[in-house]
Amino acid sequence: MPAHSKIWTAVTSASLLLLVAAAVLLHHSFRLTALSDVIQCLLLLSGTLSFLPHVLKSRGRMRLFWALIMSAIAMWFSYQLMWTYIEVWQRREVPELFAGDIVLFLHIVPLMAALALRPQVPQDEHSARVGRLDFALLIVWWVYLYVLLVIPWQYVVADDLAYSRTLNSGYLVEKVAFLVSLAILWWSSKGGWRSFYASLFGASLTYSASSYVANWAIPRNLYYSGSLYDIPLAISMAWITVIGLWTPDREPQESSEEPSTGPGVWLARLGMAAVFSLPAFAAWTLLDAALPHRVRAFRLVLTLAAALLMGIMVFTRQHLLDGELRHLLKHSRESIANLKRLQALLTESEKLASIGQLVGGAAHELNNPITAMLGYSELLLATALSPEQHELAAGIAQQVRRTRSLVSSLLSFATQGPAAKAPVDLNTLVRTAIKISQPQWQTLKVEVRADLQPDLPTILGDSNQLLQVCIQILNHVLSREQLGTGGSLAVATHHQNGTVSVRVSGLGRPTGNGINTASAGSKLHFDQGLGETALGACQEILQEHQGRILFQKQEKGGSTIRLELPVSSPAPAKPHPARFPAILESQPFA
């Protein structure tokens, strides 16, 4: 506990002991009255200021909670200040019809509002708005109750006895309601909040009991300011200061518990009960034959005005609830739509998992004959063959290795494992793809021309997948639908601004200069329809490599396709050997 809080507590305790000593040792006199009233004012001022650090340091709903408690104690202090002004400054008895009694009656209302905030429980903004309206209904009802019961006997028809009776009865009902609410929060809270509510309950119970005893002693001429009846009242005032000073050292944080709708429901029910009580009060006013006519008319007009005001508040509350219901309905529809999409994705995922298992099993089964074919082809290459036979045997071995790479890719897909990426020389991939496609372009009598930029930077990727992309693009451009028999095919690589590109262009009618440069230089575009063609798989592979594919249809037949891939490093790197048989890299293709 800080040193200034200890000093503050000590001064408060000394003031309380001084008041107790004066009540025990001094007889009824003006000096005793003045001393008692001034000390009580100082105790309430101390209690008000003790909660000021809470208000300044906290935020949001917590700040409002402490501000309401501080305002309630400030109202109590203002009432005691008015009492002291009359008894000490004016040196006269406080009148029975005291205008300041309304301040004493209403100072409990901010305390009830603070309890309704329940800062220890998480609460969404909508619930907070509705809860504030519900409690506003109760505040209006308490004010209405005081004006209905007390004010007529003070200003409409002056009657000391009726005024005291109705004031004490209404104040007693209010204090009992507050103590019950405080006891419920004390019982339902945990940790530091439980201690705080317990201390506040103890101080409030002490005050209520002392107030009841003092009201009992007043008509019997036993009470006077500074008497023994003021000692419990002063203890409750000093207790408030101790609560305000000690709470910062063990101020609880907001609870992580889920919000409970029970208190909010009961608060709404109490608000509705307050609204429905107005006709009962109106009927009671009409049926009480002993009431003076002016009091009856005042109460009926007051009840009508209160019904109008509370009706507007109920309408506003219902409007907020309707808006929340519309929001919940919209949110529910969106949740159902999202759930349906999730179900569709789960179904598709299950299908892909089944396909992956099927592909994995088939790939494992294919590995055995492929291994045997590769072994036989290598044995065949080791025998004495003519040059033409050797070339054919090498072609068989090349296709077997390519098939094994495809099977490896299928297994990688089936296991959902990420493909290993390494620096790859794109020129080597292009040469290998052209060599593998040689039977196709030779059959179609297509002239193939390559313009590969030397010292091309390497790219980071999976060589098997990128080779498949290059082969698929060449096959697409060489297909009869795109190029037909006869024609020309140009393949070029280029590096610019950290991007390596491969351009494949084909013309259905070869010219003397090869490619029609006007057509080849036209603007390429990303074709959304590629996903529905054989190039859809190429598009997905390039996306995994942070690349893209551009496509253009030529006017005279054929097409132009460009691949773009980021380089693996800003500076040109030394070509990295690709993982392909040396026989495919050493033989010319034109």
Image (tube, helix red, strand yellow):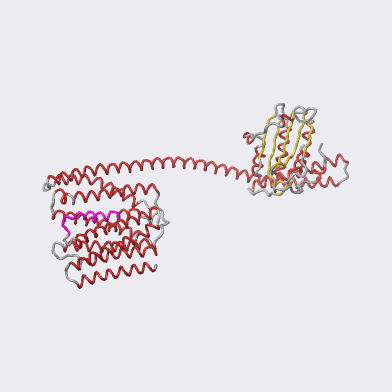
Find out whether residue 446 is within the magenta segment.
Answer: no
Please state which of residues 31 and 580 is positioned toward the viewer in this rendering: 31
Position of the N terminus by quadrant: bottom left
> What count of labels does the image hold?
0
Position of the C terminus by quadrant: top right
Whether residue 505 sits left or right of residue 314 in the image: it is right
Q: Position of residue 35 (x, y in %)?
A: 22, 67
Q: Residue furthest front?
A: 89
The answer to which quarter of the image holds residue 19 is: bottom left
The answer to which quarter of the image holds residue 548 is: top right
Residue at point 31%, 69% (across, down): 11
Whether residue 310 sits left or right of residue 249 in the image: it is left
Q: Position of residue 45 (x, y in %)?
A: 29, 61
Q: Which residues are magenta?
A: 94-111
Q: Position of residue 528 (x, y in %)?
A: 62, 34
Please state which of residues 356 and 141 is positioned toward the viewer in this rendering: 141
Q: Position of residue 55 (x, y in %)?
A: 37, 57
Please state which of residues 18 and 323 is positioned toward the viewer in this rendering: 18
Whether residue 557 sits left or right of residue 222 in the image: it is right
Find out whether residue 110 is within the magenta segment.
Answer: yes
